[in-house]
Image (tube, helix red, strand yellow):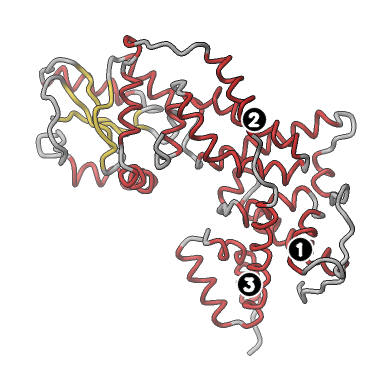
Amino acid sequence: MAMSARDDEKMDEIELLLPWRATGALSAEETRRVDAALAADAELRRKYDLVQEEMAESVLAAEEFGAPSTRARDRLFAAIEAEAGPQVAQPSARGWRARALDFFGSLTPGAIAWSAATAALVIVLQGAVLTRSLVTSSGTFHTASAPESRDGSFALVAFAPDATAQQIGEFLAARGASIVDGPKPGGLYRVKISATRLDSDALKAAVATLAARREIVRMAVASE
Amino acid sequence: MNDTVPDEVLIARIAARDQAAMKALYLRHQTRTYRFLRRLVKSAELAEDLTGDVFLDVWRQAGQYEARSSVSTWLLSIARFKALSSFRRKAPETFDPETAEEIADESDTPEISLQKVSKAKALRLCIERLSREHREVIDLVYYHEKKIDEISIILGVPENTVKTRMFYARKRLSEILREAGLDRGWP
């Protein structure tokens, strides 16, 4: 049976995707489409063999380049050392930023990977997730984590995807806030926003202040 | 430092001037960054210098990192920019980024004789004879295993252009192989 122009176009698109099929860099749907085409077309399979051959030799060719020398590394870190200046212990400087960073570092790879993988989905589903699953009838969040110190007031915060680490750090520091837990499902962080227990109105006001910075905070709600 | 710490966490630590995190990130990505630069600039010495420049930028600008792309994609984007800048510095009066991308680079590349090398080796040598534009897209796809959208970010071109550029790079590779006496039967 003669192929239609549409079939030709579809086949061309499939052929363009072959290199990414070889490296496993296609979506599940694209992979399924390419695999179906490969199963049905011997000529396409021959072309795919060529792609795999190219891939193997490209990898070998890149590996032949070796690695940068220790001289390059030493020079780089000498430059960094010169810029950073002497590193001295500054206990008073271990505020929100260091604690937040220590916290990030303490997360298990699985927890972080999970958070990263769901981040994009969370943006889309944010409204539904927050309203249907996490917010209780009282308008506050319940978390499944072990309770931390009850001292202080807390919010659950999701940061804007475009916010940089520096922006988030400065934003929290300016408010005397710090991350105490997270990321939780949905990319949420538990943030301590006051060292004292705020009454309901004050807590709402503090959370509203956080949420007002939309370029930094995607959403914020009071947490018990 | 634990080598399972995600890149994004290392970047956050680097933004807080953590040199141990900087060393961890460097150890993790130095080789791939260097090899990408070698592919672009060919000179080992220049590639080393540019690799250092890339990571010095990371040290200085980690706070500007936005998680719109992976850290490795960000690094390769910086590396590419450094390579292009080095070309401009090298020949400021004659550099034309448009034509420079199109011209196959045959300098310091030995003539390929299939009587002397294996088919596999010939393929590797022919990759070296591609234009810079074609070499880099082949490297990003096959060695760095980057997705189409990631390559689009690194090269600053639409995703469809990434796909067609890869196709033409492969086609040109086959043509060079044919000229060297190895006909793959495609295109």
In 3D space, how far apart are the residues under numbered discs 1 and 2 (Cα atoms)? Answer: 30 Å
User: Which of the two marks, 1 or 2, is nearer to us in this view?
Assistant: 1
Q: Residues within 10 Å of mark 2 (few under 14, many from 20)?
A: many
**In this view of the protein, which residue sits in the foreground, B40 or A206?**
B40
Instruction: Say what amino acid the circle numbered 1 marks.
Output: Lys
| Residue under disc 1 on the same chain as residue under disc 2 | yes
Determine whether B137 is above or below A147 in the image.
below
User: In which quadrant will I find the N terminus of chain A?
Assistant: bottom right
Q: Where's residue B53, x and y in %?
A: 65, 28
Q: Earlier in the sequence, mark 1 or mark 2?
A: 2
Residue for badge 1? B121
Residue A13 vs residue A47, the one in the foreground: A47
Amino acid at pointer 2: Gly
Q: Chain of mark 2?
A: B
Q: Residue at x 10, y 39 (%)?
A: A137
Quarter of the image where the C terminus of chain A is located: top left
Q: Which mark is residue B52?
A: 2
Q: Does label 1 lie on the same chain as label 3?
A: no
Q: What's the residue at 70%, 62% (across, down)?
A: B167
Q: Secondary structure at mark 2?
A: helix
A171 displayed left or right of B70: left
The answer to which quarter of the image holds residue B37 is top right
The residue at which mark 3 appears reads as: A48
